[in-house]
Image (tube, rainbow, N blue to C red):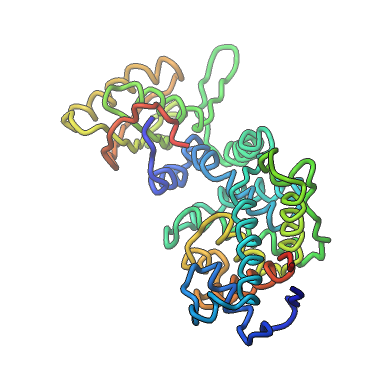
Amino acid sequence: MALDPNQATLPCGVELDALIEQITEATSPRDPDHQAHCPYCQTALAGFRQGWSDVQTLAGAPVPIPPALTTRIMTRVRVLAHRAAQNLILAGARGHTQISHQVIAQIARRIALATPGVLFASAQPEPGETAGPRSVTLTLRLITTYGPALRPLAAAVRANLNRRLPNVTGAEIEHINIAITDIAEPDPHGSDGG
Amino acid sequence: MVEVDDRILVGAAQSGDLDAFEMLVRRYHAPVYRIALRLLGSSADADDVTQDTFLRAWRSLARFRGDSSFATWLYRIATRRCFDLFAAHRPTQTLDEEQHGPSVDPASTIEQRERLRAITQQIQALPPDQRAALVLREFEGLRYEDIADVLETTVPAIKGRIHRARLALLKETTAWR
């Protein structure tokens, strides 16, 4: 049966747009009795159904993502971030050692995460107010498990940071401010959140 | 670790936490890449746009107020970048079937593969505004409200674009027998 898709209507008078809407929006036919017995409508519907099913197949097909795309993105972001970041300066007899606040943040985050009950940690170091170039004030945001009392948990995070961060980085910690932003159930599968 | 809500990761990233931003990149680089690939038709351009999108997002993160979701905000940056490339009169490329075409079931018939190729070409031939709306709806499954937010227009305008795109697609690619 020769049907012309460029015509607005089928020879029976039904608009092609209406049939396409019926398929793509899964709506009911405007005239079910006519449609059930009309060979033009049936032919056009079969064609559109096939076409729409092909669109769905295409949409469901996996798209290969270029290798190492996230690594390439993060390399560039880290360059930008480190350019803007502050540094900790450790003076020594044989020269200065400079440690970016980004590095302090990453280490502080890992120390906080090692405290039982902490599920997610984010750390923001800022230069301390009083002491010299080794001094930092830390602000931490935590997500914790439901269960442990929060004040002792925060105290444990502070104690771990005070004990380990100066050893690892040479930083002098002035203050540690902690915000517990959420509580959650631990993920049994150990997903990285991504 | 626990599945952390976007808003918490964004808050942490806004304070300069690169690990939190990296989690967001891992979460969203694939949809951003797919959208750019469907809009531009070239994997090299889509790769560039994906990198640009996240660099721009990092730079503008302080201005993100959470009026829309982080995903919507990212998709807006990505589609704007694609539209910039269209405006620069970049020739639209047809997806390279061998490398970047749909990896459909190998058992599919030659006839079906031909039909899928015809649809892919027809999508590339749509006007950019219709193509963007169609890709976000049919390929990424966004709600009309979110598509309107991404493309900075109204829901009725989006519905109109998607309707016209579907008509063009089905009328041009349906096998009439």
Instruction: Looking at this view, name the residue that lies furthest to the top.
Output: A93
Q: Nearer the viewer, residue B66 or A55?
A: A55
Label tally: 0
Q: Is residue A141 above or below residue A111?
A: below
| Percent coordinates x, y for residue B121 in the rendering | 77, 59
Q: Quadrant of residue B38?
A: bottom right
Q: Residue at x 34, y 27 (%)?
A: A188
| Percent coordinates x, y for residue B7 in the rendering | 40, 49
| Percent coordinates x, y for residue B58 in the rendering | 56, 48
Q: Nearer the viewer, residue A34 or A157?
A: A34
Q: Residue at x 61, y 40 (%)?
A: A77
Q: Nearer the viewer, residue A167 or A129?
A: A167
Q: Quadrant of the N terminus of chain A?
A: bottom right
Instruction: Looking at this view, name the residue that lies furthest to the bottom.
Output: A13
Q: Is residue A60 above or below residue B150?
A: above
Q: Is residue A178 left or right of residue B172?
A: left
Q: Quadrant of residue A79?
A: top right
| Percent coordinates x, y for residue A150 in the rendering | 19, 33
Q: Nearer the viewer, residue A65 or B170?
A: B170
Q: Residue at x 28, y 25 (%)?
A: A157
Q: Residue at x 41, y 37 (%)?
A: A124
Q: Is residue A75 above or below residue A36?
A: above
Instruction: Looking at this view, name the residue that lies furthest to the left.
Output: A149
